[in-house]
Amino acid sequence: MNSGILLVDKAKGSPSFRLVSLLRKITQIEKIGHSGTLDPFATGLMVMLIGRDYTKRSDEFLTTEKEYQTTVHLGISTDTYDIEGQVTSRSDKVPTLCEVEVAISNFQGEISQVPPMFSAKKVQGKKLYDLARKGISIERQPVLVRVQIELLSYNYPELELRITCSKGTYIRSLAHDLGQFLGTGAHLSTLNRLRSGSFHLKDAVSQELLQPGFDLIPHLRGSA
């Protein structure tokens, strides 16, 4: 079997498309996809689809529920809503634990979320991040998503959260919106995907192992 599903633990700082390139070199298979990208600063589970039989099923994998562990940094807002962006505002306000819990309670279940300008979402055929890089900001229509947030710890300025969410949820937007609700501003400083559908990070191989000569066969999965 030289095609199938490969679970990979993406390294920090690596673009998601780098995994596609690595796997093409190892497998000599051109048709390689995934169940959803991660930003370069993010880490964690990437479900890689190797071979035509799997890439043609990409839509069913893209729609699955995702789970993340993340750090939200309060007091600093950025234009990308994450640690890689330019600082747009700062605040000295230090919310109480009670205020944080109230804020989180307002972002549970089905919520309306506006996609960030720095995203691959297309509006009238143009990717938002292409416009954002030119300094152009346009109106974006809100999207209904489902989220469940668990507060793991709060030690100002950092909130540690576990988030389960539906397809199309932007965790960066969630961090930004929490900061707006609290009146402090905020950005996402870490993001680690723990689960995608029925696939779990604990079963993934490290991206560092994906070198020429690495035997993928023992790690490939069949139909899910």
Image (cartoon, rainbow, N blue to C red):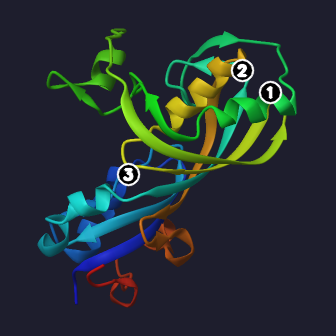
Badge 1 amino acid: Glu
Q: Quadrant of the rendered structure where residue 4 is? A: bottom left
Pointer 1 residue: 99
Badge 2 amino acid: Leu
Task: Give the quarter of the figure containing the C terminus.
Answer: bottom left
Q: Nearer the viewer, mark 2 or mark 3?
A: 2
Q: Mark 3, residues whose alpha carbon is within 10 Å: few (<14), some, or many (≥20)?
A: some
Pointer 3 residue: 16
- Residue at image position (24%, 76%) is 27
Q: Mark 1, residues whose alpha carbon is within 10 Å: few (<14), some, or many (≥20)?
A: few
* SS assignment at label 3: helix
Image position, residue 20 (x, y; %): 29, 60
Does residue 94 appear left or right of residue 57 in this picture? Answer: right
- Asked whether residue 211 appears in the rendered view, the answer is no
- Residue at image position (52%, 45%) is 147
* SS assignment at label 2: helix
Image position, residue 17 (x, y; %): 32, 51
- Residue at image position (37%, 50%) is 37
**Dot placed on the residue nearer the N-terminal end, 2 or 3:** 3
Pointer 2 residue: 182
Picture mark count: 3
Q: Mark 2, residues whose alpha carbon is within 10 Å: few (<14), some, or many (≥20)?
A: many
**Dot placed on the residue nearer the N-terminal end, 3 or 1:** 3
